[in-house]
Structure formats: C-alpha cells, structure tokens
Image (cartoon, helix red, strand yellow):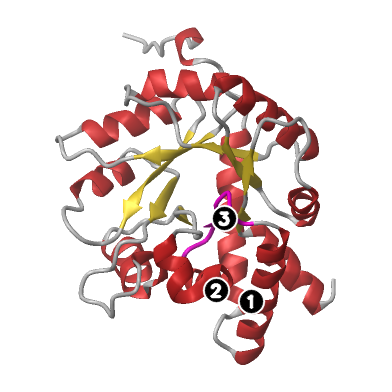
Amino acid sequence: MNAPHRLAVLVDSCLLPTVSGSGDRLPDWILHGLERGTPGAAVDAGCAAAARRAARALRAALPGALAGHTGPRPAVDGTAAAAELVASGANLHLGVRPDPAPGATGAFVTGLQAHGVAAALGPFTGAGGLRPFAEGLAAGVRAIAVGHAPAPGGDGRPAVLSPAAVTGTLRGELGFSGAVMSDALDAPAVVEGWGVPGAAVLAWIAGVDLVRLGPRSGSGVREAIHAAAARAVTDGDLPLARLEEAAERVARLRRWASEPRTPVAARRPVTRDA
C-alpha cells in the first residue's frame, strides 16, 4: 500500500459520519468511506423505526459496523437504555452523561455494556469534578467523548482540540486507554474558529482517536479533512504514528461492540464448589 493510500485509509478509519433521515440507502460519500475503512456512523433519526432502517443499511454495507445513537430520553438505567438501543440497532451510546451522584455513572456504564452496547461517556473537558469519569473508567467504559467547552487553564480553545485536556488529563492523570471520541465537530464554536477540517486535524494531534462528523457535514467536508490531514502529515504537525494509534483504538472499540453476546437475563449464574 503506497503512502498516500495508507494515509487516506487511516483518516477514514478515524472518522464517524452521521446518517440523517429515514431512507434505506446510505449517502454515497458515507458508503465510499465505509469501503475505505470508516468504522460505522452515528444515526440521527427521529424515531426508532427510522433508526432501525438506518442501522440495517449501515450493517448491510459494513457488517459489524459501529452504529452510534444518542440514547433514550428521559434518562433510564443502563440496562433499560441498552434494551432500547439494541432494539433500534445501535451498539454505541453516544450520550452517556456523567452523573455526580456517587456510584451512578459506574452503575449506568456497567448495565449498558453488559448488554453489548459500548458507552461513550462525556462530554469531557478536564474541568470540574472528574469523579464520574474515574467511576466510568473503573467500570470499564469503552469510549470517552471530549466536548466543545474551553479546556481549563488553556488558550480558550475547546477541550476537544487541547492536548492538555486529552493527552494530559484524560490519558495521563486519569489513565484512560480506550477510544477517545470528539463531540460532533460541526458545532458553531468549532466551525467559526477552526473549520471542521482544521478542527479534525487538531483533534487528532491533541490525542482524539475518533472524530465525529455532525449531520451538517457531507462529502465536501470529508474530502477537505483528507486534504488537511495530508498537509499536516507532510508538514510534520500530525505524525502518521498518531493516526495509526488512533485507528487501532477505534478498531478495538468496533471489535468489542460487534461481538455476539448472550442476553444478560439468559446468562447462567456462576457456581463455585463448596
């Protein structure tokens, strides 16, 4: 595989586009990305039936794809949330919010992931209390989503673009080794300051693994991200090894989320000899 093609595959492997609407066919630009390594998509659908159709189309194009969803509202416990998400075809909960009540975040993550739905806990900014995130880590949370709010003690840039927040606090202080995601990069606070392509590159440099593209992103944005990443690699700002590391973490997340699992209620209890 030549170097430009390898870079293109790595970039696609670290992008999570958003599927909008209720059609049974995915947009061509998303299909092309799935053929090149994109691990799945977030599903932005107005009802459960539409979400199921989008998830079916996604898995028809890529068996074992990540199918992200923001989860049920109002909030329910992790087991109930997992049941609803599984019914809609999702295997990645994009909207797991940290709960300040002691033990609540860990319990939610445990209940959710016991049913094979990966939790993306966030938004993480490095500010405020870190206890819910520490609880999530102790419960084995598979992903953490970094948000758009400014990182503490920085230059005002969003946490998702801050090496201090991602590599320093999340990776270093908390010791998280799973997949780090971005919140959707088409938020005004990001677009107005850096544009989606520039923000994607800065997020990877900061230590983010999986860049989430919002529903307003399309084929032109994907192509611009590829061009921005190529420039950053050529200039030495974005090491290829950083993208390789990110792609491997995303691949681990996808493998975990696509593993077949026995429903929790059907599992036999573990017995020990007296």
Q: What's under tag 3, amino acid-wise?
A: Leu
Q: Dividing the image into 4 quarters, which one contains the N terminus?
A: bottom right
Q: Is residue 151 magenta?
A: no
In x, y percent, where is residue 233? 63, 83
In x, y percent, where is residue 157? 34, 74
In x, y percent, where is residue 126? 26, 62
- Write the start and end of the magenta stretch as one range: 208-217
The residues bearing labels 3 and 1 have C-alpha atoms spaced at a distance of: 15 Å
Asked whether the beta carbons under mark 3 and mark 1 sit within 8 Å of each other, the answer is no
Identity of the residue drawn at 57% across and 30% down = 90
Element type at marker 2?
Answer: helix
Quarter of the view holding residue 170: bottom left
Identity of the residue drawn at 48% across and 12% down = 267
Tell me the number on the disc at residue 201. 2
Relative horizontal placement of residue 80, taking residue 151 as reference (left or right): right
Circle 1 sits on which residue? 229
Circle 3 sits on which residue? 213
In the rendered view, tell whether residue 185 sits above or below residue 236: above
The residues bearing labels 1 and 2 have C-alpha atoms spaced at a distance of: 6 Å
